[in-house]
Amino acid sequence: SQTIHQWPATLVQPVGSPLSLECTVEGTSNPNLYWYRQAAGRGLQLLFYSVGIGQISSEVPQNLSASRPQDRQFILSSKKLLLSDSGFYLCAWTRDTEAFFGQGTRLTVV
Amino acid sequence: AQSVTQLDSQVPVFEEAPVELRCNYSSSVSVYLFWYVQYPNQGLQLLLKYLSGSTLVKGINGFEAEFNKSQTSFHLRKPSVHISDTAEYFCAVTLLTQGGSEKLVFGKGTKLTVNP
């Protein structure tokens, strides 16, 4: 069966510090991978998606970047966090027509 | 622009009343349509999806949605809601990109509150 792992579950980081959130998928190959941010009143905002290794599409200009070093690994990064980067980040993968979500990371920038 | 619009950010209803959560999408290409539910402090769960065929789609927990191509809508309905239906509901669309790949885009969500 397919599973998706996302960590850490919660993270508190100071302003200006770097960020690395990791997401891995098991039980499938060549999935489409996504990073979303969920904020109150803004729903699920698509940040990045990837259709293959090294292929990253950015949806919104921001302080974040994404990388896909392996087929089933998707990383969300920042060199210097801003207060506005606080939020709930969700990794997801899709194949054919359905999406499967990680448990999310609650990031608080202080 | 390709996007998903959920017209109501909050919908309060009384228990056993019917409910409709509205969703419109803008796209000139064929799409797949979804409704997801997020209960308090939980992840996202698929309620139902439209891929092709019958425009009336039945999902879990008594929900159903109707795909209306001419109105580019995919409204979610339930004839009689329960307290336990209190959650946030997200409409989503799989869109084809110019490069031929697909991306999944969500609406901003509708918070359904069912009151006794």
Image: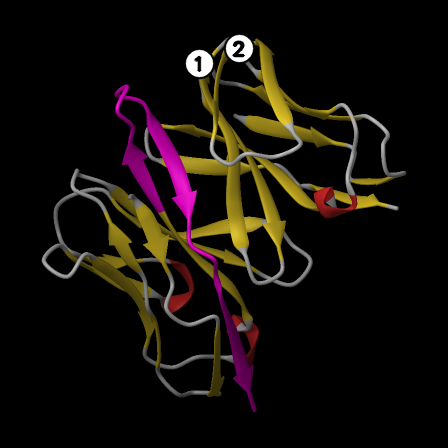
Q: Rounded to the nearest whole Å, what is the CA distance between mark 1 and mark 2? A: 6 Å
Work out whether mark 1 precedes mark 2 in sequence or the reverse, and give the earlier one: 1
Check residue B69 in the rendering and tell me which mark sits there, or answer none.
none
- Which residue shows up at 52% across the image and 9% down it? A54
- Which residue shows up at 52% across the image and 49% down it? A44
Q: Look at the image and tell me in which quarter the N terminus of chain B lies.
A: top left
Q: Which residue is mark 2?
A: A71
The span shown in magenta is B93-116
Amino acid under label 1?
Asn
- Which residue shows up at 56% across the image and 91% down it? B116
Above or below, B51 relative to A91? below
Relative side of B78 to A70, left or right: left
Above or below, A14 relative to A51? below
Magenta stretch: helix, strand or loop mostly: strand
Q: Coloring scheme of the render? A: secondary structure
Residue A4 vs residue B74, the one in the foreground: B74
**Which residue of the protein is positioned furthest toward the left in this rendering?**
B70
Q: Which residue is mark 1?
A: A30
Residue A41 x %, y %: 57, 63
Determine the image quadrant of residue A82: top right
Using the image, name the chain to which the residue with label 1 belongs.
Answer: A
Question: Is residue B41 inside the magenta stretch?
Answer: no
Q: Secondary structure at mark 2?
A: loop
Above or below, B55 relative to A32? below
